[in-house]
Image (cartoon, rainbow, N blue to C red):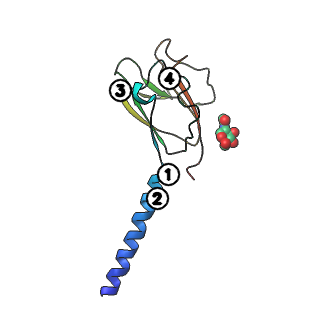
Amino acid sequence: MAEGRGGAVVAMAVICLLVVALQCEAASFVVGDKAGWTMNIAGWEKGKTFKAGDTLVFNYQKGQHNVVVKKDPDDISMCSLHPDDKEYKSGKDTVTLNKGPNYIICSFRHHCPQMKLYINASWPI
Ligand SMILES: *[C@@H]1O[C@H](CO)[C@@H](O)[C@H](O)[C@H]1NC(C)=O
């Protein structure tokens, strides 16, 4: 009986370790760091390594910007909001990166030329 419980405890510990290990793989980035999601965002993503499953946190004044995850990340000249895109506008939005190209913009008029992120995320491992 005691031995059976011991086995269960070990199994639980192993499962917990696996969960922790997997969670460690996903990183969270605050876009623009302290300044947040602003017109000065250009270049923020340079030199950083992003993996699928990592999260981006967009902090901004609600109503001043939005966060649009483009359905088609390949057309990086697009600055408008398409019905298939995912739009966030709470002022504190979290976006999880997909594997491969991720193209995220502010679709407000005249904002996107500066406010865009193009991130090519690799596999988590
Ligand atoms: C994204 O990165 C992968 C792996 O480095 C590469 O094979 C692929 O061509 C890249 N995709 C784009 C659109 O840059």
Spatial separation of the CA atoms under disc 3 and disc 4: 16 Å
- Residue 108 numbered mark, or none: none
69 versus 6 height, above or below: above
Q: Residue at x 39, y 75 (%)?
A: 10
Left/right placement of residue 4 relative to residue 85 reads: left
Q: Nearer the viewer, residue 4 or 40?
A: 40
Image quadrant where one finds the N terminus: bottom left
Q: Quadrant of ligand 1?
A: top right
Q: Is residue 19 above or below residue 40?
A: below
Q: Secondary structure at mark 4?
A: loop
Check if mark 4's residue and mark 1's residue have beta carbons within 8 Å: no
Element type where label 3 sits in the image: loop
Disc 3 versus disc 4: nearer the observer: 4
Instruction: Give the residue type at disc 2.
Output: Ala
Mark found first going from the N terminus, 4 or 1: 1
Mark 3 or mark 2: name the one nearer the start of the chain. 2
Residue under label 4 = 41
Residue 48 or residue 97, whichever sits in front:
48
Q: Which residue is mark 3?
A: 91
Q: Secondary structure at mark 1?
A: helix
Viewer-closest of 44 and 71:
44
Mark 1 C-beta closer than 8 Å to ligand 1: no
- Circles 1 and 2: CB atoms closer than 8 Å: yes
Which residue is drawn at the image coordinates 50% and 11% (left, top)?
110
Asked whether the residues under the numbered discs 3 and 1 touch, taking CB atoms below 8 Å apart as contact, a structural biologist would say: no
Coordinates of residue 23 in the picture (x, y in percent): 44, 53
